Amino acid sequence: MKNILVIGAVAAGTKAASKARRENMDMNVTVLTRDEYISYAGCGLPYYIGDVIKSKDELLVKTPEAFKKEFDIDVLTHHEAIDILPEAKKVVAKDLKTDKIKEFKYDKLILATGASPFVPPIKGVELNNIFTLRTVSEAIKIKQLINTGKVKNAVVVGGGFIGLEVAENLTERGIKTAVVELLDHVLPMYDKEMALLVQNELMEHGVDVITGEAVEAFEGDSDGNVKYAVTPSKKIPADMVIMSVGVRPNTELAQKAGIELGDTRAIKVNHNMETNIEDIYAVGDCAENINLITGKPAWFPMGSTSNKTGRIAAINLFAENAERDELRGVLGTNVVKVFNMNAAKTGLTEREAVKEGFDVETVIVPADDRAHYYPGYKKIVTKLIADRKSHKVLGAQIVGEGVVDKPIDIIAAAITFGARVDDLAKLDLAYAPPFSSAMSSTITTANVWLNKVADKVKGISPIEAHEKLSDKNVMFIDIRAEEEYMVKTIPGAVNIPKGRLKKELKDTPKDREIILICNVGKNAYLAYLTLKHMGFEKAAILEGGINAYPYELQ
Amino acid sequence: MPEKHINCRGMQCPGPIVTLFKEIKTLEPGDIITIEVTDFGFKKDINAWCKKTGNELLSLEEKDNVITAKIKKT
C-alpha cells in the first residue's frame, strides 16, 4: 500500500491530509507534528486570551482521534521530523515523549511546517512573561497569567494584525496596553493614511501607540519577571510583553534535505505546489506564493491561502496531468477588526504599485456602507489604486466602522479577473437598503477615480495636505456650514461656506494655491468646479475630506 | 423645566448638528433637548460641539442603531 506522509498538522497539513484521503481511499495517510494540539484555529488565539472565546476546546477543530475515526488518518502528535531522506524516500522523526527515533516511508511527502514568530535579540528578551502568540500552548500560558490579575500593564511589540488584535483583547480585559511599532504607523502592510485611521481608533480606546521606535531592552525585577520595555524615548511599564514583530517560514528541515528556497526565504514551489525534489510538496505558511499582479515571488502566511495550497497539493499527488490543480497566484487579501474599526486590503498598496513601476493613480472616497436612511449604516473609507494607462485595478484598502469585507472581496474578485476601473464602475451589485446603497461605495470610488484620471478634478491626499499645513502660501478653505466648521476642522482652515465662495474670493489672486475641504470630497468637488470657472489655477480638493483625514482636527 | 425632543433619524451630516444649533437657540438656559440620530459620525461631533458651545451633554446612548443625546442648554 502506498504511503502519503504530511509534516505539520495545523491548517494546511490537516487540509492536505483530509483531501489526500478523499482522493486516495486505498493508501496510508500519516501526519507528523511536534505539537500537542492539531488542527486549531490559530487566528482565534487573540480572542481566546481576550476571553471572547472561553475555552481552548472551542479553538480545536478536530482531534487526532477524530481524524482516525472519521478519515482513517494517523496523526502522530509529539513527533518531530528531524530529517528527510529523499533518496530513500524516508522521514526520520523523534518521538518527543519517549526520545525514540522512528522512520516513516513515503511515496509522496507534503511539507506543512508552518511559520514561527520571529523574536529579535533584544536585551532582556529572555525575562519571564515575555511571550509570542502562535500556538494554543502559548495562548494558554498567556491567559493563565492574565487570570491571576497581576497584569496591569502590557506591551505589544509590533503593530501588525496579531499585535493589534492582542492589544484590543488585552484592553478589553482591563489591561493598560501599549503598542510599539518600528514603522511610522501601525499595520505596516497598509498605506499610511489608511493605517492612521486604525491607529486613531486604538488611541481613542486608550491604547498607547508608539511608532517609529524599537524596543531596545526589557528590564525585569529580582524574580526575573519583566517590568519595563525601554524605547529610545520611553520606559513603558510592562507586567507582560507579547512579541508580534512577524513570522518566518519554518524551512530548516527542507533546507537540510536540499529543498530549494525562494527569494522570500520560504520554500520555492511551482503552481502545483511541487518543490524542486520529486514527490515532495510544500503547502501553507512554509511555502512561497506568487503575487498575482506582479507575477513575482511573495509570501503571505494567511490561513485562507494555506487551506487552498493544502488542497491543491493533495489533488496533485497522483493526478494525471489533465487533472492537476494549480494556484496561479494570490493577492494577499486580508481583513482585521480593531475595536469598532474594520480594515481590509487586497492587491498592491500605493507604495508597492509605485515601486513596481505602474503609472499609479489613487483616490480616497468615504461612503456609507448601506442606505443612509436605514438605521445601522456606518461609514467606510475606500482607497483605490489603479494604473493610469491601462486602468487596471491594482489594489484597494477599506477602513471604517461599516462593512469592509464585502467591498474588498468585490475588488479582490475584480483584480483576479483582470478588471479595469471602468469595469468596476459598472458592476451589477446586490442592492436593497439594509445591505448597500444604490450606488455602492465600490462603484462611487471607481467613478471618482475615473473623474480624477480624466482631469475633471484635482485632488490631494491627506498626507500631502498635512505636509502643506505650515505652508503660508496655501489657503485651506473649509466650505461646509459654519456649524460643522465649528465642531471640527483642519487647523488653520478658514470657513467660507460654498454659497459665499464667489463673493469672498473675488479679490484673491488666481494663482493662489487653494485646498477645498468638505466632509467626504463631494461638495468640495462642486466648489472646485466653481473656482475653476472663476479662473483659479491651483485649486484642489482634500481627498476623503474631514472623514478620511487622519491627523489632528481642531 | 421644558424638554424638547427632536428626531434627526435618517439625516446625514451636517443635518443633525445644524438642526441642533437652530433648535437650541429657541430654548432658555436650563432647558433640555433630546436628539435622535442615525449618523454614527454624530457621536464624536456632539462631544466636540458641547465642549465648544459650553452646553452640557447629559447622556449619550446607542441602542438599536440609534444614537440618543440629551443636552442641557447653559
Image (cartoon, rainbow, N blue to C red):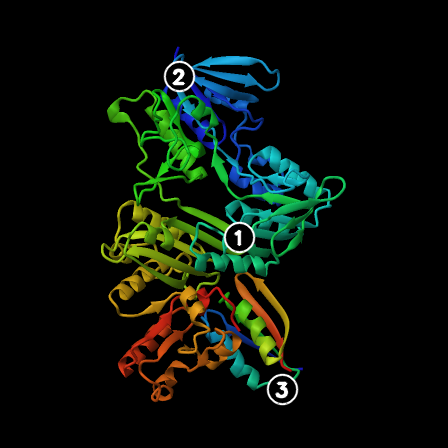
The amino acid beneath tag 2 is Pro
Residue B12, can we see it?
A: yes
Q: Does A308 sit above or below residue A103?
A: below
Location of residue B54 in the rendering, given as x and y in whole percent from the top left corner = 62, 80
Viewer-side label of 3, 2: 2
State the residue position of label 3: B28
The amino acid beneath tag 3 is Glu
Viewer-side label of 1, 2: 2
State the residue position of label 1: A338
Mark 3 is surrounded, within 10 Å at the Cα level, by few (under 14), some (14 to 19) or many (20 or more) other residues, namely few
Viewer-side label of 1, 3: 1
Q: In this rendered view, identify the residue nearer to me: B67 or A98.
A: A98
Which image quarter is the N terminus of chain A in?
top left
Residue A432, can we see it?
A: no
Q: Distance between the residues labelled 3 and 2?
A: 87 Å
Chain under disc 1:
A
Residue at left 62%, top 18%? A97
Secondary element at tag 1 = strand
Q: Does B30 sit above or below residue A459?
A: below
